[in-house]
């Protein structure tokens, strides 16, 4: 739908769509070296406390999604939230983002962008301790609203 029959790129016209309550949830996994993970979790990253900085970066990124992703619509966001789950046994942090809007088009890209930038911010804040950090599985978990209906991906 972004490429017309004449191969010209265009932004999808959503002007005929009605505003609709929409939500999207995304997920990312960050894996650390066990040697450094406990130090990082105890807020001893050389750049400071990682979770609030990462949360803020993700929120800011979601608000800028249309500037980062070509042909992505600029939408009004009702909320962006980002939460974290740490697993000491596996030396991992799970990042969850939720984006909500009452717009004519979905918020999947905003949720995914928020999650990806949150993960990258954690990497940036911890790379001086552990450059082998791995960011995995950034993916859409859920979306509601719109013509295509609901989507659920329980595979995390």
Image (spheres, rainbow, N blue to C red):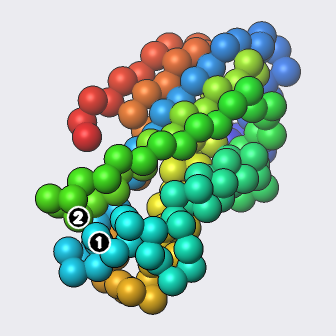
Q: Residue at x 21, y 81 (%)?
A: 35
Q: Quadrant of the C terminus?
A: top left
The label on residue 37 is: 1
Picture quadrant where residue 56 is located: bottom right
Q: Residue at x 36, y 24 (%)?
A: 152
Instruction: Depth check: give the residue in front, 109 or 85.
Output: 85
Q: Which residue is most to the left? A: 89
Q: Is residue 134 above or below residue 2?
A: below
**Looking at the picture, how far across and down is residue 96, in whole percent?**
44, 42
**Looking at the picture, how far across and down is residue 125, in whole percent?**
52, 76
Instruction: Depth check: give the residue in front, 130 or 29.
Output: 130
Instruction: Depth check: give the residue in front, 83 or 25.
Output: 83
Instruction: Depth check: give the residue in front, 96 or 48.
Output: 48
Q: Residue at x 64, y 26 (%)?
A: 100
Provide the residue designation for mark 2.
Answer: 91
Q: Is residue 33 above or below residue 142?
A: below
**Looking at the picture, how far across and down is residue 10, in whole percent?**
77, 44
Q: Is residue 37 visible?
A: yes
Mark 2: few/some/many CA within 10 Å (<14, 14-19, 20+): some
Kind of element beneath mark 2: loop
Circle nearer the N terminus (2, 1): 1
> Image check: 62 left or right of 131?
right
Kind of element beneath mark 1: helix
Q: Are marks 2 and 1 in contact (CB under 8 Å)?
A: yes
Picture quadrant where residue 36 is located: bottom left
Q: Residue at x 64, y 37 (%)?
A: 80
Q: Is residue 107 visible?
A: no
């Amino acid at each position: 739908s972004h490429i017309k029959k004449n191969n010209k790129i265009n932004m999808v016209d959503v002007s005929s769509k009605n505003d609709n309550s929409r939500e999207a949830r995304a997920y990312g996994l960050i894996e650390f070296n066990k040697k450094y993970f406990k130090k990082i979790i105890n807020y001893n990253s050389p750049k400071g406390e990682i979770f609030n900085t990462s949360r803020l970066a993700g929120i800011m990124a979601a608000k800028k999604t249309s500037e980062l992703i070509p042909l992505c619509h600029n939408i009004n966001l009702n909320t962006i939230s980002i939460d974290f789950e740490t697993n000491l046994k596996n030396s991992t942090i799970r990042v969850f983002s939720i984006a909500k809007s009452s717009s004519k088009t979905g918020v999947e890209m905003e949720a995914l962008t928020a999650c990806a930038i949150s993960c990258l911010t954690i990497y940036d804040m911890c790379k001086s301790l552990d450059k082998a950090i791995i960011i995995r599985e950034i993916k859409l978990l859920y979306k509601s609203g719109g013509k295509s209906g609901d989507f659920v991906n329980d595979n995390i």
